[in-house]
Amino acid sequence: MFLWFAAMSLVLVALVFDSPALDYRLVILGAVLPVLEGPAGGPWMLHTLSFAVAVLFGVMLVARGRRLAQRRWLGLPIGLFAHLILDGTWADREVFWWPFAGASALGRGPLPEFGRWPAGLLLEGLGALAALWAWRRFGLADPSRRRAFLREGRLTAISA
């Protein structure tokens, strides 16, 4: 599942935060990054709340005193948080709250995003619809808007 995480996180974060300084490419990266744990045999660190919080603290510390850099890089932990919500990791207490709910929870069972077939196909279809909606909402058919998104991660909604 790729579109479900990429498009839905983009849409949800853009609608909630509506920030011109946030790099929405990093939101997408953070939202799809945990899928890379698939070949590792199950949910590991990227599926834990602890990891997302650690990345958030890391961004705030590394970019301390540089407000625009903080806002831009906050997209990465925000995307990680979005993934935890969109894949239902919050329902797996041991993985979500690792290491506080037990240190042996990681690496067991399938990734939540691949454990719900055929419903995963429906979610991927909804992700495609969300991507189409975002394409129209943010005017990405316009080359200058698309370039701003691809080069700088900026999105601005088209006025209704």
Image (spheres, rainbow, N blue to C red):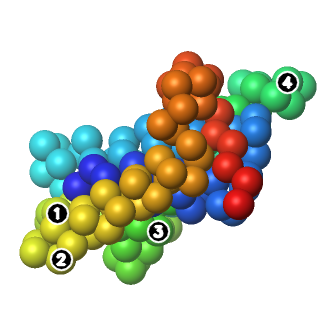
* Residue 139 visible in the current orientation: yes
Q: Position of residue 69 (x, y in %)?
A: 76, 26
From the viewer's perspective, tell me whether residue 24 is left or right of residue 156. Answer: left
Residue drawn at x 86%, y 31% is 67
User: Amino acid under label 2?
Assistant: Ala
Q: Amino acid at mark 3?
A: Ile
Q: Quadrant of residue 68?
A: top right
Residue 134 point in image, percent of width and height: 50, 53
Q: Earlier in the sequence, mark 2 or mark 4?
A: 4
Q: Give the mark, 4 or 3, whose residue is nearer the N terminus.
A: 4
Q: Residues within 10 Å of mark 2 (few under 14, many from 20)?
A: few
At x 18%, y 48%, the residue is 38
**Is residue 52 depicted above or below 21 in this figure?**
below
Give amino acid for label 4: Arg
Given residues 119 and 115, the one toward you in this image is 119
Q: CA distance from mark 3 to mark 2?
A: 16 Å
- Above or below, 90 against 67 in this view is below
Q: Please indicate, yes or no, whether residue 108 appears anywhere in the rendered image.
A: no
Residue position for label 4: 66
Which one is in front, 65 or 126? 126
Asked if the residue under mark 2 is in contact with the one under mark 3, i.e. CB atoms within 8 Å, the reply is: no
Q: Secondary structure at mark 4?
A: loop
Q: Marks 2 and 4: CB-CB under 8 Å?
A: no
Q: Sequence order check: which comes first, mark 1 or mark 3?
A: 3
Residue 114 image offset from top left, x and y in percent: 17, 63
